[in-house]
Image (cartoon, helix red, strand yellow):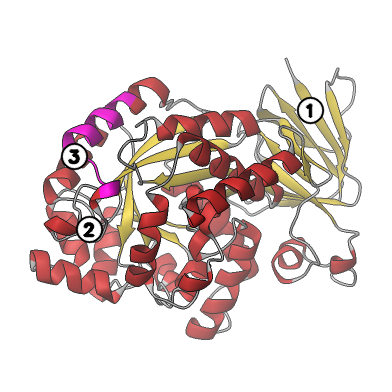
Amino acid sequence: MARLLISNLKEIITMDDQRRRFTGYDLLIEDGVITRIEPEITAIDIDEFIDGTDMWAFPGLINTHHHMYQTLTRNIPQVQDVELFDWLQYLYPIWSKLTPEAVYTSTLLAQAELLRTGCTTSSDHFYVFPKGQPTTLIDEQISAARKIGMRFHAARGSMSRSQKDGGLPPDSVVQTPDEILKDCQRLIEEYHNPDKGSMVQIVLAPCSPFSVTTDLLRETAILAREYGVHCHTHLCETIDEENYCIEMHDMRPLAYMESVGWIGSDIWYAHGIHFNDEELKILAETKTGVAHCPVSNQKLASGIARVPEMLKLDIPVGLAVDGSASNDSSNMIAEMRAAFLIHRVTSGITSMPAETALYLATRGSAKLLGRDDIGSLEIGKMGDLFMVSSQRIGFAGGQLDPVSALIHCGDSQVVDYTIVNGQIVVDHGIINTIDEERLVVDQNRISQQIIEG
């Protein structure tokens, strides 16, 4: 039995149902599971030990929407000041040059950035499958997650409606419905693990209403429910998308998705900015979830999701960084800060307390992914957490509330420790499962190749 003991923590922020916090407690993880949270745990054999003096411990953050391959194309000047549809049309030809090496390396890079900023579990929505490349690109992502040690929900994206069929993407990055569904089934059967503590799960994730056919949406939902996996897609991100659905299907986006079976507690949408009052009620009644992406929504000028209202209606809401080319970082602490700030402007000073922002990134996100074994620090849950020293310059004079300090203060968002499944992955701010310097060199080389190509 592998045991990790963290002793004398300055404060443990549990995010359990009672939102309890413990001062001066120890935390024991055995075979990846939290087994004890109490003062002065002694008289046991341990394999690893961390002195938690002056450390704040938080549940590992959970990212519910990302496009990790986009770390290769962030900060491109030509798309810094354009909205979503124009942004996509510029980038699709670049993304059509993705290779297995590019997918593996960019996934590793995004996960490294997430882990260094306290994220222990991430979903990733990968939907670009260039013609002439192997179709096993999701396998590359799973290999990267296993290498670096991140808990991973691989969302097998798809695009089947190209420009010639009235969609947005070019022919070079779309597949046939048969190719897509066959690969979805293969990935579920080969990789999906629904058990407690699983490190890999598969999600089925057609890209958007403007890039897939109606039949593919319907068949994907049927296949997902046959295997008991979740479904995910973009929805209500922009007014352009809304107009597209009305013009193509004579329905608003949510009504269209409902018509093809895409509603329920096993479905979550990315963004959800432009739902009206009646649609919010439908989401609440059906427990259909929303991944909130505040930084991307602001950068692309897409709008601001009505998250405080969603929470009052008990709609499941999690937090997400979205694609690195529209963010342009993979930093969940920064995302919490963005959510905290933007909703105070739009919904009032009490609409988004710091602890609510942390809830979105932990318990809320876990619910979207259909997991009850992560998202809080409790006995019986998985040993996923991050730790930050309270003695940093950026926290000096701000010791009264660690949650507020994490979100409001700080001179760096690189954490001291990140622990996944009881394994120390980030140690004193450095990832110990990969060569960080080599990864940066590889990423920059590949990025330059596909952009210049």
Q: Residue at x 55, y 51 (%)?
A: 447
Q: Position of residue 224 (x, y in %)?
A: 26, 35
Q: Which residues are magenta?
A: 172-186
Q: Residue at x 40, y 77 (%)?
A: 303
Please identify the quadrant where the N terminus is shown: top right
User: What residue did someone put label 2 on?
Assistant: 209
Tell me if residue 346 comes above or below residue 10 in the rendering: below
| Image position of 201 (left or right of 76) | left
In primary-sequence order, the first of circles 1 and 3 is 1
How packed mark 3 is, by other alpha carbons closer than 10 Å (few <14, some 14-19, many 20 or more), is some
Q: Residue at x 36, y 35 (%)?
A: 133
Mark 1: secondary structure: strand
User: Which mark is in front, 1 or 2?
Assistant: 2
Q: Position of residue 13 (x, y in %)?
A: 71, 52
User: What residue did someone put label 1 on?
Assistant: 4
Mark 3: secondary structure: loop
Can residue 355 be seen? yes
Q: Position of residue 64 (x, y in %)?
A: 47, 51
Q: CA distance from mark 3 to mark 2?
A: 16 Å
Q: CA distance from mark 1 to mark 2?
A: 46 Å
Tell me if residue 380 comes above or below residue 165 in the rendering: above
Residue type pointed to by label 1: Leu
| Image position of 10 (left or right of 174) | right
User: What residue did someone put label 3 on?
Assistant: 176
